[in-house]
Image: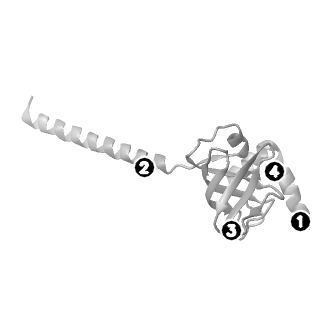
Amino acid sequence: MNPIRKKRLIIIVAILLGVIATVALGLTALQQNINLFYTPTQIANGEAPQGARIRAGGLVKEGSLTRSEDSLTVDFVVTDGDADTGIQYRGILPDLFREGQGIVALGRLNDKGVLIADEVLAKHDENYMPPEVSSALEKTGMLKNYQDGQKETNK
């Protein structure tokens, strides 16, 4: 083989290996940061992975909010109309958090099926609901009930 061609081939192979290594490292880093969204029905059906960081959302069930008296731990239930999921959060809840509101919680499922959340996100105005929550509620028919309840409280 001609020495010039051999040198070009080595350079091309080195560049390709560098690109492959960069893509592999990038995909590995992104895979660790992916937070998939699961509805309470999917969590109840066992579709959500145990121990992996996930996002779960729905409406905070009326009467389910309990606060610990000696710490910042809060327990509540999120529903999508078909199933309920318990969520435990230690920290200060967002100002807009309340029962009957749509929320998204980020955390890990424990062995009892309770989401141990490290972050809770509440809607930011009276008409907004996270897209994942609204699509999950739309599938179960709860979105219309939620919107009807909003109209009644706004009168």
Residue at figure coordinates x 70%, y 66% from the top left: 124
Circle 3: residue type: Pro
Sequence-wise first label, 4 or 1:
4
Q: Position of residue 24 (x, y in %)?
A: 37, 43
Q: Nearer the viewer, residue 138 or 95?
A: 95
Residue matched to label 4:
143
Circle 1: residue type: Thr
Left or right: 119 in relation to 27? right
Q: Nearer the viewer, residue 88 or 30?
A: 88
Residue matched to label 3:
94
Q: Secondary structure at mark 3?
A: loop
Q: Is residue 130 visible?
A: no
Residue at figure coordinates x 69%, y 40% from the top left: 42
Circle 4: residue type: Leu
Q: Nearer the viewer, residue 75 or 62?
A: 75
Left or right: 131 in relation to 107? right
